[in-house]
Amino acid sequence: MREAVEKALNLIRPALQADGGDVELVDVNDAGVVRVKLTGACGSCPMSTMTLKMGVERVLKEQVPGVTSVEQVR
């Protein structure tokens, strides 16, 4: 599943990088919980929670069967 998550994150990266940020995969557990770290401008942006849930989590759930949620690691 980790490989599939990385592929899906590569779909999101260009949009994040256009705003000066990025996303780093930290962990994927057996329950389908993906842990990521938002870096660059995304790490300190007040909208990062929305980016995480409405962007990253939505795309990962659509692209990778078995993903149940996405959590941010600081």
Image (cartoon, rainbow, N blue to C red):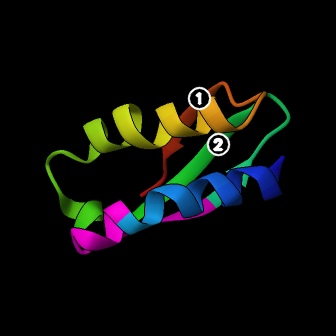
Q: Which one is nearer the viewer's eye here, 44 or 66?
A: 66
* Figure disc tally: 2
Badge number at residue 69: 1
Residue shown at the point (40%, 68%) measured from the top left: 14
Give the image quarter of residue 61: top right
**Image location of residue 24, percent across then percent down:** 54, 66
Q: From this view, report whether residue 6 is shown above or below residue 1.
A: below
Residue 39 visible in this rendered orientation of the protein: no
What is the three-letter code of the residue carrying label 2? Val
Circles 2 and 1 in contact, beta carbons < 8 Å: yes
Start-end of magenta stretch: 15-25
| Type of amino acid at the residue the image marks with label 1 | Ser
Residue 60, x across and y down, in percent: 59, 39
Q: How would you rate the neighbour count of disc 1 (Cα within 10 Å): few for under 14, some for 14-19, many for 20 or more?
A: some
Q: Quadrant of the C terminus?
A: bottom left
Quarter occupied by residue 27: bottom right
Q: Which circle marks residue 34 in the picture? A: 2
Magenta region includes residue 16: yes
Q: State left or right for residue 23 relative to residue 40.
A: right
- The image shows residue 15, relative to residue 53, as above or below, that is below
